[in-house]
């Protein structure tokens, strides 16, 4: 796929700001610092569409990215940083609940995890949240370039087991450094966008 247009439509604090659009949407979620912005930039072949290195926890907005006037990526703020307040957690939950419950053009969830680490309780909550709303999910294990050869199989298995991945929920090894997995991510995204 060639991305000839990649544009931030809006950073929406709540449902009233969601763009009026009928493009199919895939949601991208993951812990803060997992490499989500890097993944967005890598798969769209842009240097700074998503802002890399933004202060963890600062953003509580859904970022809607229009790709080629065909597809919408919905970037969820990174979760799981240590000093999130209760109010912020509540707001985050409400924002996601609103989205999953009400956004009719949603097609799927891409959950991003760090290939080096066991997924956290927050990751489980996020994927279970999407499953509860019957949203198809797939998982990307990023920063694969940081693994030793001997760790690859083991770590991918830990991710599958911790998230209780189902047959149809694929796990894609990925790296924004080496570009490993870009085509596979697009294959899955297009399946969802066109579903
Ligand atoms: P976000 O908070 O999830 O959006 O994460 P970022 O994309 O800002 O990445 C967090 C840090 O991890 C940055 O220092 C990135 O350069 C680094 N990073 C992201 N993806 C990769 C990757 O695939 N490999 C390596 N080695 N570093 C990465």
Image (cartoon, grey):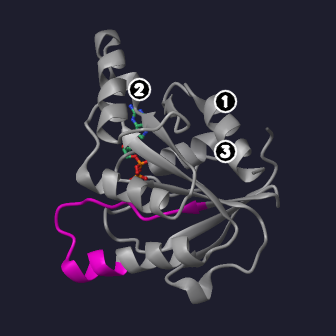
Say whether disc 1 or disc 3 marks the residue closer to the N-terminus: 1
- Magenta stretch in the rendered image: 74-91
Q: Quadrant of the N terminus?
A: top right
Neighbours of disc 3 within 10 Å: few (<14), some (14-19), many (20+): many
Q: Secondary structure at mark 3?
A: helix
183 relative to 50 in the view: left or right:
right
Q: Secondary structure at mark 1?
A: helix
Q: Residue at x 35, y 81 (%)?
A: 91
Q: Is the C-beta of the residue carrying label 1 under 8 Å from the nearest atom of ligand 1?
A: no
Q: Tell which of 60 and 112 is nearer to you.
A: 112
Q: Is the C-beta of the residue carrying label 3 under 8 Å from the nearest atom of ligand 1?
A: no
Q: Which residue has dot 3 on it?
A: 189
Disc number placed over residue 8 in the picture, else none: none
Q: Which residue has dot 1 on it?
A: 183
Disc number placed over residue 144 in the picture, else none: 2
Say whether disc 2 or disc 3 marks the residue closer to the N-terminus: 2
């Amino acid at each position: 796929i060639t991305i000839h247009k990649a544009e931030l439509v809006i950073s929406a604090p709540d449902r009233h700001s969601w763009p009026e659009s009928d493009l199919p949407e895939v949601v991208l979620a993951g812990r803060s610092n997992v490499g989500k912005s890097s993944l967005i930039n890598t798969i769209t072949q842009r240097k700074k569409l998503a802002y890399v290195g933004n202060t963890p926890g600062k953003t509580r907005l859904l970022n809607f990215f229009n790709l080629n006037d065909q597809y919408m990526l919905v970037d969820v703020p990174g979760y799981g940083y240590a000093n999130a307040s209760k109010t912020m957690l509540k707001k985050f939950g409400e924002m996601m609940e609103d989205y999953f419950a009400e956004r009719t053009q949603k097609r799927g969830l891409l959950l991003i995890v760090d290939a080096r680490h066991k997924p956290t309780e927050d990751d489980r909550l996020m994927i279970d949240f999407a499953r509860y709303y019957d949203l198809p999910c797939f998982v990307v294990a990023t920063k694969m370039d940081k693994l030793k050869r001997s760790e690859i199989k083991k770590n991918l298995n830990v991710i599958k087991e911790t998230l209780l991945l189902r047959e149809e929920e694929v796990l894609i090894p990925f790296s924004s450094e080496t570009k490993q997995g870009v085509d596979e991510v697009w294959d899955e995204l297009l399946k969802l966008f066109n579903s």
